[in-house]
Every structure is written in structure tokens, then in C-alpha cells.
Image (cartoon, rainbow, N blue to C red):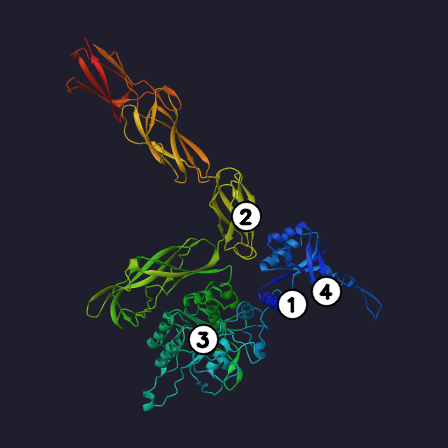
Amino acid sequence: MKSFLHTFIILLIVLFNLENLQAQSYYQVSVYFKTGVTRIVSPGDTAASVTAQDILNVLAKYNLPASNVYPAFPSFVETDTLKVIDKLGDSLKQMDKAKVFVITVPDTTTQNNLIADLKNLSEVLFAEQNGSSVPYKVPLDPGFGNQWGLNNTSNPGHDIHAEAAWDIFTGNPSSIIGIIDYGVDITHPDLSAKIAGGDKTYSIDQNGTFSHGTVVAGIAAATTNNNVGIAGVDWQAQLLPQDITDYNNCFCISYFKNEHGDVQTNTKIYNAVNFSPFVWTLNHSYGLTYNNGKDGRYSLVVRDGFAYAYKNNRTSVAAVGNALTGTTTFPAGFTTGLIGVGESDMNDLVYGSTIGPFVDVIAPGQHIYSTDYNNQYKYEQGSSFSAPFVSGLASLLKGYNTSLFNDDIEQIIDLSADYYGSTPPYDQAFGYGRINAQRALQFLESPYQIQHLSITGGSIYATTGNMKMVMLGVLGLSDALYTVQRVEVRTTITLPTECKIVGVWGTGLGTNGFRDDGGYCFGEGFCQVVPGSVTSTNATLRTYIYYVTDVLGHVIGYFPRTPQNVKFTYTILGIPAPVINGDNMVCTTSNPYTLSSLPSGATVSWSATPSSPVQINTPNSNSTTLTKVSSSLVTLNALVTNGCGVGQNYNATKIVQIGGPYVGINYSPNGSCVGSMQVWQLAASLASGTNWHWSVGYVGTNGSIYILSPLSQQTFADVVGGGIINLNYTDLCGVAQQQGVTVYSSCHSQAVIAPNPASGMVTISTMTTQTNAISTASMPWKIYQMKLIGPSGNLVGVYKYPVGITSTNIDVSNLPNGTYTLQFFDNTTWTTQQILVLK
């Protein structure tokens, strides 16, 4: 019984592991091996034996073990290659499936590269992708075929690439999309399971034909893959309806007791934000109009709601309207962190939506099939129905990476869009293009990387004159009108070393400078990359602070920070450059060198410059080790094929000391001459050593060298003449080393005075013999001034030679007997000698 139970448990574990393996993302290559690979058939198991070395080498190139090779048809009987068709009696030759194997690889890049290498081998008949390597998720909803915006079968590719995006990610069930609209029919079978809370009411248009909010909600996040109705962009997101329908339009007492219009809209935005921190996205498919129905009305009340959402790191998506004019529409036209969405048709042309600088992107909006009230489905068109495509995508992005800022989501959607306009990368009709959900999600996958960074301190770039500004909801100030000077503060940032920078942008969250909304400030953090400032190494950021005076004339000063205390936050999206990790020094043999940020499927080739001091082990592997040949400083290179993405190579480098580091000696004269003696200062150029010992290696004729501190890293030496000083030490690898330097006194020797004693004419000459560490030679020096001092210290004579002389005469015949002093100036130092006058 125990044996049976034990076997049963093992079987369950095996099945569980197999289930997990199948759930992971793997890709396969199908290969027909003529020779070099055979099946191993044993009871209950079939495996492969790889015997050809060149096949093993190809596998090793991609770090694939031989166990990744497996028979594609393990139960195939080789005698079945020849069959007889019973009805006709003809023979039929089949492919020998016993020679077909599959190789499991981790990604599509490795898959493609492996196929190319295998095709070059003589043992391989063919190599190709296994057909199930790129599965797309296609929802089972029967109405999905009507949703061309998700999958445009009439004009392939002119859609948001939803199926490819869903293969990456279908959503995060924690995400909630707030539908700020005219209510949602929460009983609809494609929506009821998605309702997180909110309003239960909804309205239908005045013609009684459809429920606007219900159509919007279905596009963004209808229940998907449930064999009912349609598919939503975000399969997993919940919905939070916020009904902004004004139900009390009578002029009566009840009207004044309820919220209406902009006030109601503001409240609904606040309600959505306050409902849950997981209401990451707000969809606004409405416009602010004047009483005559025309677009273009600005509302501070509604704008405040958007500011509240922005400061709470929520992404607001707004339809730009269908005015077909250059009129700025609101709320899309609010200068805050929101995404303005225009309408596109099945050919990716702008269709019917308002044009202006507030258009960020376009999305499908013509003939859009979605949910409707009373369990119905119908087609609608307009930018109202383009916006929820973007809200669904924003929800997918935030659900995939919950650390994203709202500014990140806006920028990623802009950068990933497919542009079809005439003035790339932007125009006021297309914005940055039609959204591409697949590419947007790919920007959050390896090898791409999001970096959130900050820097504190900036300098004033420009200051306006006095102007009036209304501060609303600004922390630290009362809501009021102020006199301000807007101060633009800038700073330059250094960009990290990357293979490729997709984008760099400022983020308001975390920046303590404020946005200027044309005479209004809502306390929203604001940071922007100065247009045209981005280079391969730098970018310039800007924000605004204000020098504030209240209405009574009281100076408040710089607000919210002084320029030097402004904090800028920003984001960088790119592909990190592979970086070599490993030892900085190799004494004999190193530990492994590996690469961080190595993209999947990349291959590495190692080399060193210069190459002779080191032996590189496994030069064509993803990691390697080094063996010392001789001592030297080398540059270790790792050429990474596909290191910056498919088809883009990168060379990573690292400086490595092979053997103990060379210790140079810094040495120079120190101090003035004392006769012919000069002091020298000597120091080891690196502290990376032990057992320091300075010693005299050689001294020239009539010279001398005295070392003051022979057992320290630095010392002083008194030098007469010249010679060699050696430094003995133990390097970091424990090896005894010796370095030597030449020192010599630059102080001249004594002049020749003849005759001495003297009674008449005396000749003074500098043609003396001076010794350095290399040779002994006649080295004349020049006299620029000479003084003759008497026995009692009195000045007897001064002799000046502006261009310097090496020989001169003086007459002492009229001087009394005695010992006189001659002082010589060589234009640097004075030296002294004596002359005896004796008659």
C-alpha cells in the first residue's frame, strides 16, 4: 500500500511539474537530423542522443543543453516509412519522422538564430519554426468578428494590434476604469460581472436609440472570452460607472437641492478617485459646451477635478470631440496630464474628430460595435468611442507595471503609436498616431527598462514681469488671486549609458515646481524636457516656480521652492547597455565574468586589448574566465550580438588589471639648494601595496644620497650629484616587486677661483665637473650677479651680468690682506665661496 501511495504521489508531482512547464512561454525549432542525433527508445521513455560535435557546438552557443533536443514523434515506427495504399495497391513513402526532433528554446530571437545556424550544418536536412511558437489570444466572444478596431480583417494591420497585445498581457483584475459618462447599464450580461461599484443609473440619448456610457464601458472592458457578446480591450479590469446625467432639469425647488452640470462632473471625478486607489484610469467621453451647444467652454470646476485626479496619479483619457474645426475642446484641451483622443477609420485616417494641439493620439471610432442598454449590441461612431480604446490600453499598461506614473502611461502610448500623418512625429490631426497596444506593452518587457530618476537644484532661466494668477487647490496657499512672477527653472541631466533610448520625459508626480495653466495654478507638479535639448548624453529639464505677492502687497517670496531647492523627477525608457561584472584584478585565474542586462537570445564574443597578457577561456560563451600570462592593464571586451535588440550589436568593456598593479613613483626636487645638495620628494603612485622599502641602488662619483624614511610609502632624500633610488614592495597579488628612479642635484658645483690666494688679477670660471646619475661631464653654469664681501662683512663690490657669464676677472691688488667672501647668483639661488688676498 505504501509503495502504491508513494508512486502515486510522485506521479502527481511529475504531472504538476509538467503542467507548470507547459504554462511557461517556450518556443520550439523543428529539425530533421540526417545524422548526428538519434532516438533512444527505452521502456516508457524516449530521448535523444546528440553525438555530432558541431551540433553540440551550436547548442552550446545558445546555452542549450542536449536534453532540450527531443524526438518530435516519439511513437513513430521507422518501418512505417513505407506504406501501401490498400485501395490502389501503390506504395507511399513517408518522411522518416524518427529523424525529426524538436529543440526547446526560451525566446523567438534564439529560435530564429538557431535555425539559421542549424541550416549550415551538413547533418541537417531542414530546420524551421515549430508552428505553435507564436500563439495569439483570440477571444471566444461571438461579436469579436465585428470589432475591427481590435482586429481589422478588412484592412489588416490598421487596428490597435489587440490580439498581439493580449498575447503579452490581458489585464490585472485589480484595475478599475472609471467611466465618467451618462451611466452604464450594469445589468448587461457583458458588463454585470465587471461592475466594482458606482452609480446604478444610466440614460439613453434623446432619440432613445442608445446608452452612451454603456457603449463606452463595453469597448474599454467588456467581459471577454466568455462566449457572450464582445471583447473589451482590458479583459480583466473592473468598471466604475459615474453618471453625470442631469436628471433634475426642471426649474423647481428640487433642482436647487441637487448637483448639476460642472459641479456634478467634478463630484463624480472626485468620487471615482476616492472610491479606490485602484481606479487607475478615468474615461471622459463628453465635451463642455456653451448654452447654444457649441464646443470650447472652459470650466475651472471641471478642471479642478482633473487636477485632483492628476495629483493622485490617475490617468485621464478624454475624447477630443467631433467639431472638425480648430476650436479647442474641453476637457481634452485642459493643459494637464491627460490623453486627448481623436477618431480614426478602418484605413487609419482621421475621421470626423476635432483637430488641434490637444490631440495626443487617435483610435478607432467609426462603425464601432459595442454593448448597449437592455442587453443589446450596436454600432456607433465618434471620438467618444475612440477614447475607451485608449483607456483600456492605459489600464493594461498600469496593470502590467503598477509603478508607472500617469505621465509614463501617456508618453508610452504616444511613443508606441503608429504615425500615418505627413509631418512626423506629430501633427494636430493624427497626434502621435493610432495607438498600438502591442508595441506599448512591449516597451514594458525585456530588453526595455523604465527608470524613475530625480535631481535637486536648478538655475533661473527666465523670469516674467508681474502678472495675475489664481491659485486653486495649491498646498500652502489660500485659494486666491495673487501677483506673481513666473520663474522658469532649468537643470541639465546626464543620461545613463544605454544601447537605445526610446524616450526621456519629465514627471509631475515628485516634482515640486508647478504647472502654469494660463493664469491659473492648481498645484500640479510639472516637469518637462525642453524641446530639442535631448542628445545622446544629456537633456535639459524645466519647471516653474513663482515669486508671489498677495493682494495686500505682502511678499510671500519664491513658491513652492527656491530655485536651488527645486526637485525634478523624470523617466527614461530604453534598452540598457550590457555591463560586464567580474574581478577588477586577476592574479592567476579569475572568477567568471558575466553580463548584466543581457537580452534574451544574445550571443557574446570575448576579447582583450592588448591580448598577449591574458588567456580568455570560453571566448564564445555568455560568461568567461581569464588566466594570467603576464602583468599588464587590459581592456576586456564583450561583443554582444543582438545586445541592443534584434540586429543591433553592442561592445561592453571593462578595465582589468592582470597581475599585481604597477606602482609608479612620483618624484621631484623639493626645496632650495644647500650648496650642491638638493632635497627630493618620492612617493609610490598607488597605495595598493605593502612592505615598502626605499634603498639606494647607485651613486655617481663624488655624490651621495641619504634617504630619510626608508620604510614608508613616501619619503625624502638628500641628493648630491646623482644616482638611482629603488622601491621594493609586495603587490596585491603577494608578489615582491621593484621599481627604480633616477635622481640628481640640479644645484651647481663650486666655481673655480685662480689664483687663490691672490694678490692681483683673479679669474673666476664656472666650467666645473658635475655628476648626474647617468654620466660625469663638464656642465657650465652662468653667473648673473656677483658680490664681494670684505673681512668685516662690508660690501666691497657688486658685479652684474644681464645675460649671464661663465668666466670673468676681478682685480684685488688694491685690497688689504684678508679673507673675502664671493657670492654668486645663477638667476635662481645664491652660493658662497671664499678668496684669500695675500700680498
Verify CB contact (< 8 Å) between mark 1 and mark 4.
no
Q: Which of marks 4 and 3 is nearer the N terminus?
A: 4
Q: Is mark 3 on a helix, strand or loop?
A: strand
Dot 3 or dot 2, earlier in sequence:
3
Q: Which of marks 1 and 4 is in front?
A: 1
Type of amino acid under label 3? Ile
Q: How crowded is the residue under tag 1: few (<14 C-alpha within 10 Å), some, or many (20+)? A: few
Camera sees residue 811:
no
- The label number, if any, that marks residue 561 in the structure image: none
Residue pointed to by mark 1? 3
**Marks 4 and 2 close (CB-CB < 8 Å):** no
CB atoms of marks 2 and 1 within 8 Å: no
Please report whichever mark, 4 or 2, sits nearer to the chain's N-terminal start: 4
Q: How far apart are marks 3 and 1 (CA)?
A: 54 Å
Q: How crowded is mark 2: few (under 14 residues within 10 Å), some or many (20 or more)?
A: many
Q: Nearer the viewer, residue 717 or 595?
A: 717
Res 528 seen here = yes
> Element type at marker 4?
loop
Where residue 141 sits, quadrant-wise, is: bottom right
Task: Of the two numbered discs 1 and 4 on the same chain, state the one appearing first in sequence.
Answer: 1
Q: Which residue type does callout 1 highlight?
A: Ser
Instruction: Give the CA distance from mark 4 to mark 2.
Output: 41 Å
Where does label 2 land, which residue?
624
Mark 4 sits on what residue? 75
Where is mark 3, residue-wise? Answer: 177
Describe residue 357's horizontal placement relative to residue 788 as left or right. Answer: right
Location of the N terminus (image quadrant): bottom right
Sequence-wise, the earlier of marks 3 and 1 is 1
